[in-house]
């Protein structure tokens, strides 16, 4: 069980391509951190005692971020390092802009 968790958290490696391995390791850290931080935020937001300041739209955005980070993590492990990195930046900026726009 512990070996499976370590394998899940380990960055993907792509042979002797050091540059791609480095970029994949950095993207992996960002994706995993984003996923777990947003997951904790979502779990706190759906907790019964958490004050709901923003409507259901924000919860949908949070779920979309979780889904996107999961898909990008899968794509990263398949070798699409550059594409997943670019999409991560675009989605993150879009989500932050939406959250800032919808906040009161």
Image (spheres, rainbow, N blue to C red):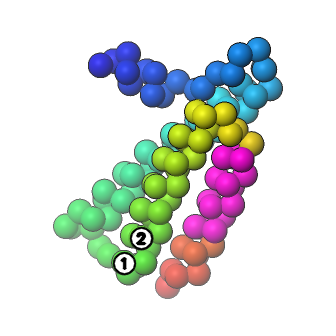
Residue 19 visible from this viewpoint: yes
> On the picture, is 11 further left or further right than 35?
right
**Magenta part of the chain:** 83-96
Residue 26 visible from this viewpoint: no
Q: Secondary structure at mark 2?
A: helix
Magenta span: predominant SS is: helix
Q: Distance of mark 2 from mark 1, alpha carbons?
A: 6 Å
Q: Residue at x 50, y 59 (%)?
A: 65
Contact check, label 2 and label 1, Cβ < 8 Å = yes
Question: For the N terminus, which image quadrant?
Answer: top left
The spot of residue 32 in percent (x, y) is 51, 40
Residue picked out by circle 1? 56
Q: Residue at x 58, y 81 (%)?
A: 101
Q: Residue at x 60, y 26 (%)?
A: 12
The spot of residue 53 in percent (x, y) is 37, 78
Residue picked out by circle 2? 60
Q: Residues within 10 Å of mark 2 (few under 14, many from 20)?
A: few
> On the picture, is 102 further left or further right than 92?
left
Q: Secondary structure at mark 1?
A: helix
Q: Nearer the viewer, residue 51 or 88?
A: 88
Q: Residue at x 58, y 33 (%)?
A: 77
The spot of residue 48 in percent (x, y) is 19, 67
In the rendered image, residue 57 lying in the magenta stretch gets the answer: no
Q: Is residue 82 above or below residue 5?
A: below
The spot of residue 15 in percent (x, y) is 71, 16
Q: Nearer the viewer, residue 87 or 98?
A: 87
């Amino acid at each position: 069980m512990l070996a499976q968790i370590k394998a899940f958290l380990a960055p993907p490696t792509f042979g002797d391509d050091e540059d791609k391995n480095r970029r994949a390791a950095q993207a992996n850290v960002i994706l995993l951190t984003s996923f777990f931080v947003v997951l904790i935020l979502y779990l706190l937001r759906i907790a019964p005692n958490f004050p709901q300041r923003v409507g259901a739209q924000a919860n949908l955005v949070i779920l979309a971020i979780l889904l996107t980070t999961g898909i990008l993590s899968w794509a990263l492990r398949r070798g699409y390092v550059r594409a997943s990195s670019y999409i991560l930046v675009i989605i993150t900026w879009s989500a932050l802009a939406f959250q800032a726009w919808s906040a009161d």
